[in-house]
Image (cartoon, rainbow, N blue to C red):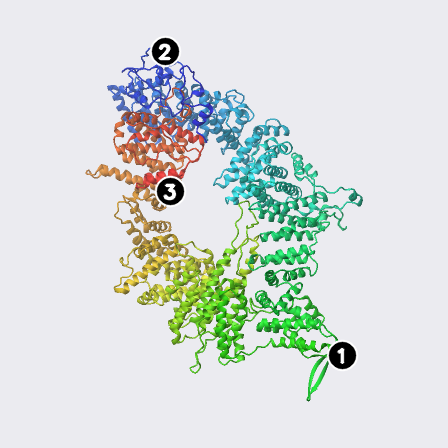
């Protein structure tokens, strides 16, 4: 907002400072600036003379000229007028601005009046030398002294009588002695609380005084006598009001022009007499105001009246009453400024404030003024009031609609719509005169970003209220609806939707949808066609006002805005769904197609516009009902004659529709061109299909082209679903009117050529880059196939269509595309459902048999993924591809066999799904006719089956061979599965049919059925008729059956010696294969090597033992599903391997040979085999190999198992990183909620779900075997260590290398000390074993690795992301497998497992790093899984901490030494903090369960280990955390529980208080001697550093050295006591006496020592201040702390503290003053106490300083409270301050009084300070008069200057906050009228501050700059921010600008910055060195 000066400059078009020609005449445009210099008065001699030029020259010349005015005082009032020459002789600088003033007007100039006033003052001063006048003075002083004895109202009358009598004794003098004191006493006698008799006597004295001094004396002493009269008028009773009006009429009105300075004050004083028209004195008061108006001119009077409306709410009603009678007719005036003043902005703001008033009558009268004088169609409003001011007035007027008052609304609508009652005229009037302003005003309110929720809602509520008036709402919706919703969208983006959305939803419901969506269509047209959209839409669609809307930009895209509307608001209106949504959908489709069909390349804006349009189409089609497209079939004749559908112009249809719907929505709805016809519906489908094809064509043109193509296809698929829904019977019934019970009407089909369109779309499948494109294309094709509304749906059966679909989808079933596997499989099965039977099977089979070898291998891998993810579906349709895979298993080609094996290992989940087709082949090809027969062989009868008819021998052979190869592949697990799975659970339809036909027994297992078939064919022989033709064939079949049976049994091992040779050979060959990435060689070698190793490690080479060992490494599986790889599922240690957990291994016999050690190259081999990236595809082979091999080398933990475990953990960590990078969420485009994110390229991931499961299983198994292995042989120990270190280093990975280094430095955990909690913990002897150290390190590594993987499994993706399906499917299984691994590891080593998890928790909360909440949450989840209950975990932690703390100090110091082999990886600090976190998240019911354990733990600690004070503070945190939980239960009501808890907390808090008070040894933690003592001290210091660095990462940088640990603990203890410790005492319901004792100890040990500082400044630690603050909040403890706090408050250094600390002391001092009632009285006593009365040797200066300091304490005490906190003590405070003002105290104390007055102004309501004003005004006038007359006495001393500065700061505050009691006296100090910015030509202000300015300028040696600061557009603040001044010249900028600053503050109506006011007061009270800097930063920063 511009200042009034700037507005005037802009109005006049020229500079106000430009010199005018001498001959120019006075005009309004020549008004000078307030900043111009005052006029020059140059006496020509010692006699005072008035130069003619001084009356009419350029009014504000140099300041040096003005200072010369006061050099010589006038001796005569008659000026000696010298003859003046012609105008040409006048100097340029003094050339008059107006013509030469005539002599008759000379005495009216300001120069003449100043000379006259100077003469009057000089005359009065001359009287003081008269002897009689001195006697007069003495009499008056005697009378005034008697006022001190006044005690009741009769005394007032007596005093006034004596004063009146004394004045009547000297009627000859026209001056009153001691006039300031007399005026003050008279003003006090006019106190409204006194009776009217006292008022009448006081007015009699006033009458006498004014009669004696006459008009000249009143003009001279206007400020003296007026200050008491003006405020009294509104309180005057009926009996005394005539006398008061007589005074105004008789003595003030004759002053005429001299009333200019107090015009505003007179208005404030007299206007209360106009509030009631029936009042007795209404007319007389009105005439009095008219007289003032005539005296000062009407424009000047009215402009000050506008200012009064702004600043004084109490007189607004009376002011409006006056305006109603006296407002000139300005509406049609040619120049209204000549009638109401130059600045019409004042008129606007005055009326705006009246319209915003809370009083209903004020608003009503203000609206009457608008309707009568400020009509919006009149020239005054349209031409003379500027547009910003018009908007201000309009916005204030619109606020009245929120009052819901009919009288207000009627007047407002009359103002906006005109006086004509016809709707057409009103609408026309609004569009012509007010609609643009309505749009601009409400739009500004929409865009305003305020912090107040009510202010944010107000413009929307106004909009909603205006919509109730149809004449306004229709036009306003057209121009404002989009702006409103755009503002709502911005507010939602800023997070402000909670309070705004209710109002927004109401607005959306009430807005006419025809108007709303019509404007949206127009805006969208302009966005797509910025050049050609205006003309057509202007004529047809919208009104003239709507065209004035700004065109939408990309920042305000109507497409994105409509998207937001559709998302934010629920559309339930059927009319909108069936009319507007389809229209907009079709129009946007056509506009989008036109844009896409442009030949030139699209820019980024067009691409983003296309994305927004597609997103809008998606939202529209989502809400579009299917019945929109219901097409009732016509008769045959009509269909024959119906023309073919042609292309529709949907944009023109929408334009025509909305153009006709502007006035009658119902008629427009009836004229809606619906889509219930095949022609428009077909055109729409064709249109959207063209959009899809064009988007695909431009997919490569822009970076967002792919996303646009995908979005277009997505919209098309949704449209097809909607169109298909139109064929539903329920939708047809809603459209037709057929009676119930009849058949639904038939519908016409869409004659769209879907086949041709699909032919154009299919080629895009060959060139896609992302899965999203393939997904959407397939969805679209399927939707076109199943759509019932199409006349000719697409057929997907042709090979050229289906093959392309299958190829495209199988491309995304490759291993590197794992995120898309699930969705691709879903699409394949969806395609199968819409095609003919076996078509998908044929297409997949063709992919497996076509192309090159690489293509076949890729197709085979893809089919494997298809098969694996179809485990829950019947796969009969995939029989042929499956048989192709099984054929490869027995192929002669090595590559094909390896491919089949890899396929089966990776993808097979259920054996039965593979066996089903082969079993069906065997059963269905049995010999139809056969007979049982026997044959005797040497007396033995052998039974056989005689085949009597031919059979399909080739299929039987094929089935048997395939089964043999498969069983050989499946091994033992397959046999077990076939033996346990029944045929009845098969998902195969063919198998179920066999059971139904009783071809096979339903109770048989698969193994039984297969063995039966094998038995049949083994026993089958041909009959005599078939002997020749089937003998060889049956022999072949028999051999195949025997081979199949043989595959179910194990074969024997080879010779041991040969086995050793093969072992070395194969290990070396495998190393070469790994080196050269020969995966095929590995898959053949690994099973062979595995068998060899089993043989070499078997003691007796017995097949039965080997069988048992292999069975122990195998894993049981559930029902019919096999494991994750190689036919084995995860190993269940608790059930499948009892050797590991259930029993410990027996010690080796002394007679048996030592166990065989692994080959020296075996470990490097397996490490390279696992870590090599190219081996990822054969990872299942390696896993199976290792799972079997590691069982054979249990005793080789250091040389094989532990290094292998580390390698596996590294590989898991690497997989976790790669998965995290692959599944990272894509970045969303910054529009209103882009739901679909398409990345420019797909992110590959080589790790599969099965790989992770295998690695987790391998890591768990290797560690479990190492943990259960016996001791390592002594002769092998050193070799094993070196070998392990070398091999682990060789295979190390950089993923966790840093952790490995730290683990080598650290030793195993101390949590193993607790051996009595978990029975499976290892013994102490095993801890000492070297191998066990390695096991512990590997345990910690394994736990951390699994914890990282668990943390990754918490990743979440958007449900719209295709990768989310795969991620969800994978993480659930991985998390389940991790859970099982944790459970098994925990059962083996519970203590070390928990310790490792706590270490992970420590790493996630480590200071100096960002806290990883996901990792922390993962630790908690894992502990919830592995620990049976919280009680066990709490018991465990209690025992561990108890054992650590209770251990002897020397052992504990050695234990925690870094060089110790038993050092812990989890410190005590981490345990304490984890324990606290565990208690904090514990449920209250669980707290009751663990209370017995914790109670014993707390008791033991308090009883035995209190000397370990470093642990006292963490223990207090534990007790407090537990107490906060148990207080939420009923257990706290139990007496024993409450007593024990209270005892624990009380003792620990007392100990912490002692520690904080440093009552223990101050030098070290515990005084020790020797090396052990140093270790313990260092341990304690390290514990403190670790604890606090983990406790609060913000404090982590504080703990750098050991020396800071003690102070850190003390600071933390104090902070904890202040925030939680002391508050916990109230929660646990501790007795008041015990709380009192604790508080007393805290005061004695913490507060009191901290206050005894010897520094020059008062510095207390922030933590101690926080403790004091908490003590003050503790009820019932004031006696314990009040003395100490009072002593601190009474310290002389208290006000030297920094401002930040001072803020913390406010609640403390407030509590002291409010809880101790005598403190305020004591402070007041100290302020008024005088040491000189009792001690004649007292130093007066020190006494004044002491009293000033006590007064400042009083000021701070009041400042610390809220509004009116000390209201009861206010009379006593007022009495003391008045006494100090009257008494002759020093300037220092006097300055403190004014500081205290400033505090009172901001801490008490204005109505409570009324009695202050007479005394305050008198004292300020006295002081400034003294400065003006004797400036040297004030200016030469520092205290005098500070006193002057303090008074000016008080005035600065008064001018800022503008209390009404001060406003009526404001004219005494500053220019409060319009003269402040629009002065007359010869105006010169004569206020008190202007006199000070003149005095200071005269004595100042340096030129001053009239600089000022502007608060325009920001909060209003204090101007005078100096702490002290060295010269009064520093005050000149403030004195020069204060008047205009006050005016501009009122003009701008800016909010007062009350926080800045408080900050300034605080700065003035505290003398810290940084106070001024803080204030300066605060003022400039904001």
- Above/below status of 1194 relative to 10: below
SS class, disc 1: loop
Disc number lying in front (1 or 2): 1
**Residue 1562, horizontal then vertical, whole percent:** 27, 57
Q: Mark 3 Cα within 10 Å, few/some/many (few <14, many 20+)?
A: some
The residue nearer to you, when weighing 558 against 1833, is: 558
Q: Mark 2 Cα within 10 Å, few/some/many (few <14, many 20+)?
A: few
Q: How many marks?
A: 3
Dot 1 or dot 2: first in sequence order is 2
* Residue under label 1: 1025
**Residue 577, horizontal then vertical, whole percent:** 65, 44
Can residue 464 be spotted in the picture?
no
Marks 3/1: CA–CA distance = 121 Å
The residue nearer to you, when weighing 1851 against 1446, is: 1446
Is 1028 positioned to the left or the right of 1077 in the image? Answer: right
The answer to whether the residue labelled 3 contacts the one labelled 1, judged by CB atoms less than 8 Å apart, is no
Residue depicted at 58% across the width and 48% down the height: 706
Q: Mark 1 Cα within 10 Å, few/some/many (few <14, many 20+)?
A: few
The answer to whether the residue labelled 3 contacts the one labelled 2, judged by CB atoms less than 8 Å apart, is no
- Above/below status of 199 relative to 1089: above
Question: Residue placed farthest to the bottom in the image?
Answer: 939
Dot 3 or dot 2: first in sequence order is 2
SS class, disc 3: loop
Is 804 positioned to the left or the right of 1647 in the image? Answer: right
* Residue under label 2: 86
* Residue under label 3: 1761
Question: Residue placed farthest to the right in the image?
Answer: 637
Q: Quadrant of the C terminus?
A: top left
**Residue 963, horizontal then vertical, whole percent:** 63, 72
């Amino acid at each position: 907002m511009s200042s009034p000066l700037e507005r005037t400059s802009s109005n006049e078009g020229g500079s106000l400072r430009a010199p005018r020609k001498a001959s120019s005449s006075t005009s309004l445009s020549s008004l000078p600036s307030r900043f111009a210099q005052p006029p020059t008065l140059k006496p020509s001699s010692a006699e005072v003379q008035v130069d003619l030029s001084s009356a009419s020259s350029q009014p504000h010349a140099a300041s040096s000229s003005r200072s010369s005015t006061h050099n010589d005082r006038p001796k005569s009032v008659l000026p000696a007028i010298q003859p003046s020459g012609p105008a040409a002789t006048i100097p340029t600088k003094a050339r008059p601005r107006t013509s030469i003033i005539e002599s008759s007007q000379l005495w009216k100039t300001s120069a003449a009046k100043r000379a006259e006033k100077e003469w009057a003052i000089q005359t009065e001063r001359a009287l003081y030398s008269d002897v009689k006048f001195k006697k007069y003075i003495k009499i008056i002083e005697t009378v005034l002294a008697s006022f001190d004895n006044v005690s009741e109202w009769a005394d007032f009358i007596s005093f006034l009588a004596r004063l009146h009598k004394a004045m009547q004794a000297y009627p000859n003098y026209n001056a009153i002695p001691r006039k300031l004191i007399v005026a003050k006493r008279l003003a006090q006698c006019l106190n409204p609380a006194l009776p009217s008799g006292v008022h009448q006597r006081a007015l009699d004295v006033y009458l006498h005084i004014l009669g004696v001094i006459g008009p000249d004396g009143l003009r001279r002493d206007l400020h003296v006598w007026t200050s008491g009269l003006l405020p009294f008028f509104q309180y005057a009773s009926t009996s005394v009001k005539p006398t008061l009006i007589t005074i105004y009429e008789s003595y003030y009105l004759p002053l005429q022009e001299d009333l200019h300075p107090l015009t505003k004050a007179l208005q404030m004083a007299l206007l209360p007499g106009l509030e009631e028209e029936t009042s007795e004195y209404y007319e007389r008061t009105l005439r009095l105001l008219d007289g003032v108006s005539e005296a000062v001119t009407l424009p000047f009077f009215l402009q000050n009246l506008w200012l009064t409306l702004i600043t004084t709410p109490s007189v607004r009603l009376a002011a409006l009453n006056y305006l109603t009678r006296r407002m000139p007719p300005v509406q049609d005036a040619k120049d209204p400024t000549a009638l109401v003043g130059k600045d019409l902005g004042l008129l606007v703001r005055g009326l705006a404030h009246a319209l915003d008033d809370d009083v209903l009558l004020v608003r009503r009268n203000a609206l009457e003024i608008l309707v009568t004088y400020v009509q919006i169609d009149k020239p005054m409003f349209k031409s003379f009031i500027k547009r910003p001011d018009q908007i201000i007035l309009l916005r204030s007027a619109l606020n009245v609609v929120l009052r819901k008052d009919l009288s207000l609304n009627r007047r407002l609508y009359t103002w906006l719509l005109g006086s004509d009652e016809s709707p057409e005229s009103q609408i026309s009037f609004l569009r012509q005169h007010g609609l643009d302003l309505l749009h601009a005003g409400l739009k500004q309110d929409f865009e305003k970003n305020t912090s107040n929720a009510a202010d944010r809602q107000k413009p929307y509520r106004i909009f909603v209220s205006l919509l109730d008036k149809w004449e306004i709402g229709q036009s306003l919706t057209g121009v404002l609806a989009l702006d409103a919703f755009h503002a709502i969208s911005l507010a939602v983006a800023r997070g402000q939707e909670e309070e705004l959305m209710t109002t927004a939803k109401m607005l959306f419901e009430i807005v006419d949808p025809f108007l709303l969506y019509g404007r949206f269509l127009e805006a969208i047209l302009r966005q797509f066609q910025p050049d050609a959209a205006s003309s057509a839409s202007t004529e047809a669609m919208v009104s003239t006002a709507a065209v004035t809307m700004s065109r939408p930009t990309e920042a305000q895209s109507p497409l994105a805005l409509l998207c937001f509307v559709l998302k934010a608001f629920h559309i339930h209106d059927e009319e909108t769904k069936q009319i507007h949504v389809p229209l907009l959908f079709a129009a946007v489709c056509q506009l989008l197609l036109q844009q896409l069909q442009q030949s030139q390349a699209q820019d980024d804006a067009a691409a983003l516009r296309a994305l927004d349009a597609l997103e809008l189409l998606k939202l529209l089609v989502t809400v579009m009902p299917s019945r929109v497209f219901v097409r009732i079939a016509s008769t045959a004749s009509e269909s024959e004659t119906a023309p073919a559908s042609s292309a529709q112009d949907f944009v023109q249809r929408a334009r025509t529709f909305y153009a006709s719907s502007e006035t009658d929505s119902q008629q427009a709805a009836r004229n809606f061109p619906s889509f219930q016809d095949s022609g428009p519906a077909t055109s729409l489908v064709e249109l959207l299909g063209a959009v899809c094809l064009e988007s695909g064509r431009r997919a490569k043109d822009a970076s967002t082209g792919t996303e646009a193509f995908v979005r277009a296809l997505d919209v098309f698929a949704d449209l097809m679903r909607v169109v298909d829904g139109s064929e539903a019977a329920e939708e047809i019934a809603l459209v037709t009117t057929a009676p119930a019970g009849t058949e639904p009407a038939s519908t016409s089909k869409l004659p769209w050529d879907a086949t041709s369109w699909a032919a154009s779309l299919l080629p895009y499948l060959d060139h896609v880059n992302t899965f999203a494109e393939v997904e959407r294309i397939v969805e679209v094709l399927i939707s076109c196939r199943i759509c019932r509304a199409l006349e000719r749906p697409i057929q997907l059966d042709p090979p050229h269509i289906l093959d392309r679909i299958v190829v495209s989808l199988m491309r995304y079933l490759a291993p590197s595309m794992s995120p898309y596997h699930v969705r691709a499989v879903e699409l394949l099965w969806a395609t199968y459902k819409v095609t003919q039977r076996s078509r998908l099977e044929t297409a997949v089979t063709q992919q497996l048999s076509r192309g090159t070898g690489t293509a076949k291998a890729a197709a085979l891998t893809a089919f494997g993924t298809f098969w694996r993810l179809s485990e829950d579906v019947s796969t009969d349709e995939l029989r042929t591809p499956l048989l192709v895979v099984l054929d490869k298993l027995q192929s002669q080609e090595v590559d094909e066999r390896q491919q089949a094996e890899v396929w089966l290992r990776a993808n097979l989940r259920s054996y039965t799904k593979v066996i089903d087709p082969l079993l069906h082949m065997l059963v269905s090809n049995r010999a139809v006719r056969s007979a049982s027969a026997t044959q005797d062989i040497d007396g033995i009868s052998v039974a056989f089956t005689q085949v009597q008819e031919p059979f399909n021998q080739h299929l039987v052979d094929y089935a048997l061979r395939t089964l043999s190869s498969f069983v050989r592949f499946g091994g033992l697990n397959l046999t077990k599965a076939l033996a346990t799975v029944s045929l009845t659970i098969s998902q195969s339809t063919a198998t179920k049919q066999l059971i139904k036909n009783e071809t096979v027994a339903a109770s048989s297992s698969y193994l039984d059925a297969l063995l039966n078939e094998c038995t049949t064919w083994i026993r089958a022989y041909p009959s005599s008729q078939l002997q020749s033709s089937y003998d060889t064939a049956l022999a072949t079949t028999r051999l195949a059956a025997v081979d199949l049976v043989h595959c179910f049994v194990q074969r024997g091992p080879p010779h041991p010696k040969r086995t050793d040779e093969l072992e070395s050979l194969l290990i070396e060959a495998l190393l070469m294969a790994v080196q050269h990435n020969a995966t095929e060689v590995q898959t053949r070698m690994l099973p062979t090597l595995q068998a060899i190793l089993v043989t070499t490690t078997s003691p007796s080479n017995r097949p039965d033992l080997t069988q048992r060992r292999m069975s122990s490494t195998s894993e049981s599986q559930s029902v019919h599903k096999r494991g994750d790889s190689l036919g084995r599922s995860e190993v269940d240690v608790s059930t499948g391997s009892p050797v590991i957990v259930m029993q410990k291994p027996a010690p080796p016999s002394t007679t048996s040979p030592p166990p065989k050690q692994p080959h020296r190259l075996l470990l490097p081999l397996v490490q390279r085999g696992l870590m090599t990236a190219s081996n990822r595809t054969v990872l299942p082979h390696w896993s199976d190999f290792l799972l079997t091999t590691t069982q054979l080398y249990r005793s080789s933990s250091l040389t094989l198992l532990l290094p292998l475990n580390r390698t596996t953990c590294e590989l898991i960590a690497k997989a976790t990183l790669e998965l995290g990078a692959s599944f990272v969420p894509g970045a969303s485009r910054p529009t209103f909620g882009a739901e679909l994110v398409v990345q420019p390229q797909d992110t590959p991931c080589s790790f599969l779900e099965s790989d992770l499961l295998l690695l987790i299983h391998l890591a768990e198994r290797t560690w479990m075997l190492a943990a259960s292995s016996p001791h390592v042989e002594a002769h092998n120990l050193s070799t094993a260590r070196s070998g392990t270190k070398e091999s682990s280093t060789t295979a190390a990975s950089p993923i966790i290398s840093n952790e490995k280094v730290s683990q080598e430095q650290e030793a195993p955990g101390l949590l193993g000390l607790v051996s009595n909690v978990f029975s499976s913990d290892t013994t102490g002897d095993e801890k000492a074993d070297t191998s066990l150290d390695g096991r512990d390190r590997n345990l910690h590594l394994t736990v951390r690795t699994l914890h990282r993987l668990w943390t990754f499994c918490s990743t979440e993706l958007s449900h719209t992301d295709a990768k989310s399906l795969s991620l969800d499917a994978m993480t659930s299984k991985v998390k389940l497998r991790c859970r099982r691994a944790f459970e098994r590891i925990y059962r083996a080593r519970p203590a070390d497992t928990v310790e490792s998890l706590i270490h992970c928790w420590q790493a996630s909360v480590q200071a100096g790093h960002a806290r990883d909440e996901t990792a922390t949450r993962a630790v908690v989840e894992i502990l919830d899984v592995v620990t049976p209950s919280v009680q066990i975990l709490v018991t465990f932690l209690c025992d561990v901490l108890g054992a650590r703390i209770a251990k002897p100090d020397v052992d504990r110091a050695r234990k925690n030494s870094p060089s110790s082999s038993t050092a812990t990886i989890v410190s005590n600090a981490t345990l304490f903090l984890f324990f606290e976190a565990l208690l904090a998240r514990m449920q209250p019911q669980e707290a009751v369960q663990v209370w017995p354990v914790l109670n014993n733990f707390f008791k033991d600690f308090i009883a035995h280990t209190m000397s370990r004070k470093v642990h006292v503070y963490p223990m207090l945190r534990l007790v407090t955390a537990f107490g906060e939980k148990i207080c939420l239960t009923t257990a706290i009501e139990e007496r024993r529980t409450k007593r024990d808890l209270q005892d624990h907390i009380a003792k620990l808090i007392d100990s912490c208080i002692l520690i904080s008070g440093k009552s223990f040894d101050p030098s070290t933690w515990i005084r020790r001697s020797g090396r052990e003592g140093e270790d313990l001290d260092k341990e304690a210091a390290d514990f403190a550093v670790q604890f606090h660095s983990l406790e609060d990462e913000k404090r982590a940088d504080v703990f750098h050295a050991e020396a800071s640990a003690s102070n850190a603990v003390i600071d933390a203890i104090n902070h904890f006591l202040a925030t939680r410790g002391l508050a916990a005492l109230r929660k646990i319901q501790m007795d008041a006496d015990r709380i009192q004792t604790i508080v007393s100890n805290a005061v004695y040990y913490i507060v009191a020592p901290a206050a005894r500082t010897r520094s020059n400044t008062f510095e207390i630690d922030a933590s101690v201040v926080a403790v004091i603050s908490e003590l003050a909040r503790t009820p019932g403890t004031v006696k314990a702390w009040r003395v100490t706090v009072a002593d601190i408050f009474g310290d002389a250094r208290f006000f030297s503290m920094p401002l930040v600390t001072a803020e913390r002391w406010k609640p403390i001092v407030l509590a002291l003053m409010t809880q101790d009632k005598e403190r305020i009285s004591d402070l007041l006593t100290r302020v008024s106490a005088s040491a000189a009365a009792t001690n004649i040797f007292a130093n007066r200066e020190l006494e004044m300083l002491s009293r000033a300091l006590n007064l400042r304490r009083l000021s701070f005490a009041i400042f610390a409270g809220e509004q009116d906190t000390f209201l009861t003590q206010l009379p006593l405070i007022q009495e003391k301050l008045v006494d100090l003002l009257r008494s002759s105290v020093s300037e220092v104390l006097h300055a403190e009084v004014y500081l205290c007055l400033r505090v009172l102004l901001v801490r008490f309501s204005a109505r409570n300070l009324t009695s202050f004003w007479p005394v305050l005004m008198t004292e300020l006038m006295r002081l400034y008069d003294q400065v003006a007359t004797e400036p040297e006495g004030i200016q030469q001393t520092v205290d005098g200057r500070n006193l002057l500065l303090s008074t000016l700061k008080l005035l600065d505050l008064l001018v800022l906050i503008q209390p009404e009691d001060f406003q009526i006296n404001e004219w005494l100090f500053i220019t409060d009228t319009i003269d402040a910015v629009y002065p007359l030509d010869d105006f010169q202000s004569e206020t008190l501050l202007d006199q000070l300015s003149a005095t200071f300028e005269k004595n100042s040696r340096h030129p001053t700059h009239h600089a000022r600061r502007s608060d325009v557009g920001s909060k209003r603040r204090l101007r005078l921010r100096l702490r002290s001044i060295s010269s009064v010249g520093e005050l000149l900028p403030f004195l020069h600008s204060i008047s205009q600053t006050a005016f501009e503050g009122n003009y701008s109506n800016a909010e007062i910055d009350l926080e800045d006011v408080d900050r300034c007061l605080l700065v003035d009270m505290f003398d810290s060195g940084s106070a001024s800097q803080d204030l300066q930063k605060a003022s400039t920063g904001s």
